Amino acid sequence: MTFNELKISEPLLRAITEMGFEKPMPVQEAVIPLQLESSQDLVALAQTGTGKTAAYGLPLLQRLTPTAQPQAIVLSPTRELCLQIADDLEAFAKYLPEVRILPVYGGTDFMPQLRALQQGVDIIVATPGRLIDLMQRGAAVLKNVHTVILDEADEMLSMGFSESIDQILEGVPAEHTTLLFSATMSREIEKIAQNYLHDARQIVVGSRNEGAENVNHIYYMVHARDKYLALKRVVDYYPKIYAIIFCRTRLETQEIADNLIRDGYNADALHGDLSQQQRDLTMQRFRQHRIQLLVATDVAARGLDVDDLTHVINYGMPEDIENYTHRSGRTGRAGKKGTSICIVHSRERGRIRDVERTIKKDFVRGTLPSPKEICSKQLWKVIDDIERVEVDEEEIADFLPEVRRKLEWLDKDDLLRRVISREFSRFLRYYANAPEIEDVNPQDKTAKTKSKKTSNSGRRAVGDHSPEEGYTRIFITLGKVDGFYAREIIGLVNNRCPGPKIEMGRIDLRPTFSFFEVPEEEAERVLKGLKGFSFKGRRVGVDIAEEVGTAERSDEGWRKGNRSGSGKGSRSGSGKGSRSGSKKGSKKGSKSGSKKWE
Ligand code: AMP
């Protein structure tokens, strides 16, 4: 089948040929004839990446008689998708210069959208909330609308747009065609179809919930406390990784991104707590490969269209199987192989089974790469890069003699040793003392005992949140709900502590409190500097965090000491002498009459 055979008109054909479309995708073969021949209502179960925009966009553009009055509305859940759809439609309409397409979405100034509407448009691509605002202001007049397209309808419903969709559909003339595209068919989608669609044809592209053919699914099962360490191993094992790491909540997303950035990875966060401007910038940088690891929530990653991800990483399994399908479908696109990795703890075993049953594909249980394997992989990359680097003789000619002179005392082997140590030291150093990660077998009862033993042995593990060597862990009653993220904490500490800049270590953010690490010798200066600090009229508590025994280990693995804001006693034992942050020191501190914060 060709687009010609589908009777796509010449100007559209020319545009899509230029875009590289050679033959129609299955959803296009199914939808285009239906829409060109009759304008029948339609429910299409098709996911992003299946070519659905062209499936509804091409016949819509072909049937349009430009009048500068809105004739069609495309509703989309997010601003990103809205812009992407409008861009695609513009590209298809390249040789239909009289057709006017306008994206309207929330979170930006009304005025430019109002003005554009006044100048006349044929197709409005909108997020539901903003379209209703524009309707209520009389700016969007829908009396000539003959086609309504609901794109990613399931996503719009899950984002709470159900009432807005009702309102919009009630505001268009009764005689209109509705096309509903959804990745899944839920009861609510069925309800919308029943209420607003007439004699709708239903088409399914690929089977619902089917995993993409060329995606491998791997899971690593570890203790919950080791999930972050396992993530680092996976990422380190693939030096050229370009991945989205999916987390369940905004807080977790920010936390994992903060940790990765702190640990030297090229990562950033994408979630709904960030401003639209920040999200746009992050997505742009990720698309341009200036960010290697994007830590994101399911919703925020919608509309981010990247075809060349090497991996999707599930930091824990998502609540819904549909979300897993969406996530894993982001890799293995455009004929490439993809890998979806799940880092899970033993209680998520059942969820893996559920997904396996639904997508009818087996997951492979992976064994985390060993430090040695990771180091070899990373070293290989360095050597490979050196081999492949393009040498521009002319460019370096002026500098070479001087460099040769400076390094003439080194032979080739010395030079190699230095290059490797320089390029590679982060991994060598980290993995020389890397905490062990226990592979968990949920059926194996000994695994639990073994893990307890590991913790009791007092081995330092970042996942247990022990401070780094030479650092003291400090607890503060400011957290993310107060708007305190890594940057704010670093700023606060340095603003309140005059003198040389304090090099901060690990920062662990929680909703209402946080932990951060400072060099041991600076702990006293920091406590002093923060003493008496108030935030929004509330006295902020600060103290040295105290490690508690495994048996009574709290979620954080640490208890909080007493507040500098209220307590006095423990401070005397928390200075350098007490080896603040060391178990001995903090125990001592707590004995000296400190109140526990539990
Ligand atoms: P969509 O599902 O509409 O987001 O489309 C996914 C991607 O496939 C987009 O990058 C489209 O430009 C591309 N695409 C759509 N139809 C075709 C086609 N017939 N041939 C090649 N690429 C296509």
Image (cartoon, rainbow, N blue to C red):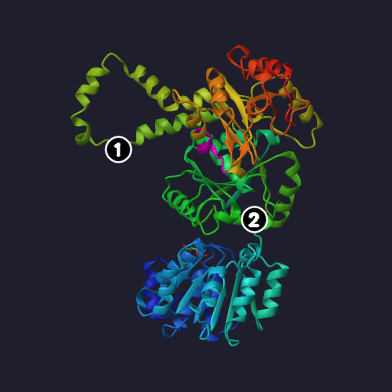
Which residue is rendered at x = 51% and y = 63% of the image?
A: 79
Q: Quadrant of residue 544?
A: top right
Label 2 CB sits under 8 Å from any ligand 1 atom: no
Q: Is residue 255 visible?
A: yes
Q: Secondary structure at mark 2?
A: helix
Which residue is rendered at x = 62% and y = 81% of the image?
A: 170
Q: Which residue is farthest bottom?
A: 175
Q: Which residue is farthest right?
A: 445
The vertical placement of 538 against 271, above or below, is above
Provide residue 489's location: percent of width, then percent of height.
53, 35
Q: Which residue is farthest top?
A: 577
Q: Nearer the viewer, residue 278 or 421?
A: 278
Q: Residues within 10 Å of mark 2 (few under 14, many from 20)?
A: some
Q: Residues within 10 Å of mark 1 (few under 14, many from 20)?
A: few
Q: Is residue 536 left or right of residue 61?
A: right
Gap between marks 1 and 2 measured at Cα = 42 Å
- Residue that label 2 marks: 323
> What is the tally of numbered marks visible in this picture?
2
Magenta-highlighted residues: 483-490
Provide residue 81's location: percent of width, then percent of height.
51, 63
Q: Secondary structure at mark 1?
A: loop
Q: Nearer the viewer, residue 337 or 320?
A: 320
**Which callout, 1 or 2, points at the residue further toward the start of the chain?**
2
Provide residue 181's location: percent of width, then percent of height.
59, 70
Which residue is rendered at x = 49% and y = 79% of the image?
A: 60
- Residue that label 1 marks: 390
Mark 1 residue type: Glu
Provide residue 62's location: percent of width, then percent of height.
45, 81
